[in-house]
Image (cartoon, rainbow, N blue to C red):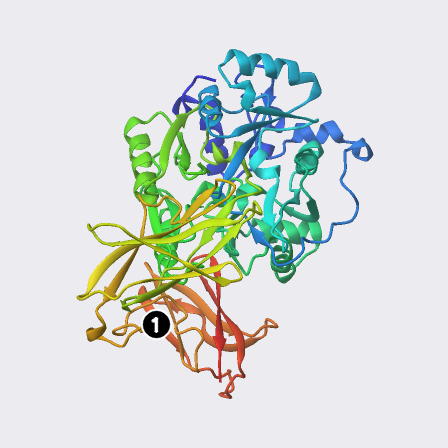
Amino acid sequence: MNRTAAASPRLLLLSLILALGLSPALAGAGGDPPPERDVDGLEDLLPRRETLREREAWRGREAQMPRRGTAADPPPAAPVRNVAEWEPATGVLIRYPLGLPYALLRDLDDVVTLHVVVSSGSQSTAQTNLTNNGVDMGRVQFLVRSNDSIWTRDYGPWYVFDGAGELAVVDHTYNRPYRPNDDLIPIYFAQQQGLPVHSHDMYHTGGNYMTDGAHVGSSTRLVYDEAASANGMDEAEVDQLMADYYGLQQYTVVDDIESGGIHHIDTWAKFLDEETVLVKQVWPAHHTYAALEQRATLLASLTASTGRNYRVHRVVCQDIGGGSPASYTNSLLLNRRIYVPLFGNAAGDTAALQAYRAAAPGHDVRGFAYGGFLTDDALHCRTMGVFDRGMLRVEHAPPLGEVVGPADLQARVEAHSGEALTAVDLCWRPVGGEWAVVPMTAQGGGVHAGAIPAPPADTDVEYYVQAADASGRTASSPRAAPVATHTLRLLAPATGVAGAPASPVRVPAPWPNPCNPMVSFRFELREAAPVRLVVIDARGRQVRRLLDGGQHPAGPTDLVWDGRDDTGRPASSGVYTFVLEAAGLRYRRPVTLVR
């Protein structure tokens, strides 16, 4: 597979199929798309969609298909936290025969273990070819099991920390029923690694899910559509399952950008950290241009789990043939490295790498070209991170707006190794000045506190929190500190009241939180569009309708909820949720009303 993506006949045919709105599984010779050949020329690889040929192979033999248990496992013990892609990893899960270049494997084995899914009949060949192509076999661990395809991202294990702080695997039902061997891989992998596994029956796929590691996740409506058709679940039941098994407090589900294709979120957007999202940018004549621009504008006006607005970065995805954009968002985050698919366009590839470096300072961004990468599947689809069960994690939300000194800061530090913390430090300096280190004090429950002293004059400050434990692990917030830092405008006490914002500032919606009773919600549209905004209670019942779904003008909007319901009566104290539906996005954000 040395041909470039731009010259690929498969790409040109697939682009035509997608442009006509056809399913690739129903197109091509014999009903299937032209196959990709693995890098060693051993087999025709299965595409991401199931093919008619696969279904025919099982016709009349469904009873012989490998199957998981008939009942779902109970969810992990609460509270549950889903692990984000950028958290400390010890390995990456791939499959042999390969749909990845050996150059990438030789790079990956420098930093993690390669967990290679391989059938017993192919293990000897895999051993020989990996060795002959320079892969460090000391960093390879085989999972010898029957398998169907290369798409480890879609069928591979998802990871959570349970209420006891232990790493566990959550195993969804792979939405490719005629690839039953793939569906069992997470269970076998968990058994091999000695991890508990919690399987559920809801259809899902890894390429259509991303989480920020702080109880927020996102998918396209594919998850709702497939759960309804395959599992008979409504949207509320899907949301509840994601809360129970993955610990999600906010599940943002969006319409897909493309009418055709696989409808996976990783083909057009990607979390780089809790606040940073990379969104595809296409040329103005492309049919997804307006939707992408509208969604990028809206997303940048909404609140991340940190309480601050998302930082939206764009990556220009040029035409790689047949009107199909390059899938630069289909990248792999692995510790502090980012592996980006390249498409043989020197200017476009270079610009994409620069976009990642601007969006994720302090990360080592590396590009890899491969002829099999397409507009809706690339490097991310064919790899799945394996996470460190003993990871050290620092969680910190920077203050909103300006702060009158001193700045009292807190961070939550979790040492999953079970070893004692040896240091938790607040490192700060005036921008361009010398670093100072303030040891933070344990407050209980993993929370540590420290303060940046009040300045004699208003000062811009940069800082980070750094921790270490007796296992030798270190972690920080931001993760790429000190190259990346948090910033803060720190005011001298004479200019305001200590501990409070010196003056009104525009902050993310909803604000204030808690509220008593007035609370504002802010969003922005690039173009006029229908918008619905309601407030619901803890039982999901509508309390107040602020916008009814009619056409709403472009630009920023600030709306105020006065704490009353639709009849004008004061709502009681409790947790309420703003639900915004606009630009194909369904976004929810809680607020606490205190009377």
| Quadrant in the picture for residue 399 | bottom left
The answer, for residue 38, to whether it is visible in the render is no
| Residue 171 position in % (x across, y down) | 66, 44
Is 19 rendered above or below residue 144? below
Nearer to the camera, 492 or 248: 492
The answer, for residue 151, to whether it is visible in the render is yes
Residue density around tag 1, few if under 14, some if 14–19, many if 20 or more, within 10 Å: few
Of helix, strand and loop, which one carries label 1? strand
Is 354 rendered above or below residue 279? above
| Count of numbered labels shown in the rendering | 1
Task: Give the side of residue 76 with respect to residue 358, left or right.
Answer: right
| Quadrant in the picture for residue 572 | bottom right
Amino acid marked by disc 1: Asp
Residue at (22, 65) in percent of width and height: 455
| Residue 368 position in % (x across, y down) | 40, 26
| Residue 594 position in % (x across, y down) | 49, 81
Nearer to the camera, 37 or 490: 490
Task: Give the side of residue 551 with respect to residue 167, left or right.
Answer: left
Nearer to the camera, 169 or 250: 169
| Quadrant in the picture for residue 284 | top left
| Residue 487 position in % (x across, y down) | 29, 56
Is 483 rendered above or below residue 346? below
Q: Residue furthest left?
A: 457
Residue at (49, 23) in percent of width and height: 105
Task: Give the side of residue 128 with respect to residue 349, left or right.
Answer: right
Q: Which residue is under mark 1? A: 558
Q: Residue furthest bottom?
A: 569
Nearer to the camera, 475 or 540: 475
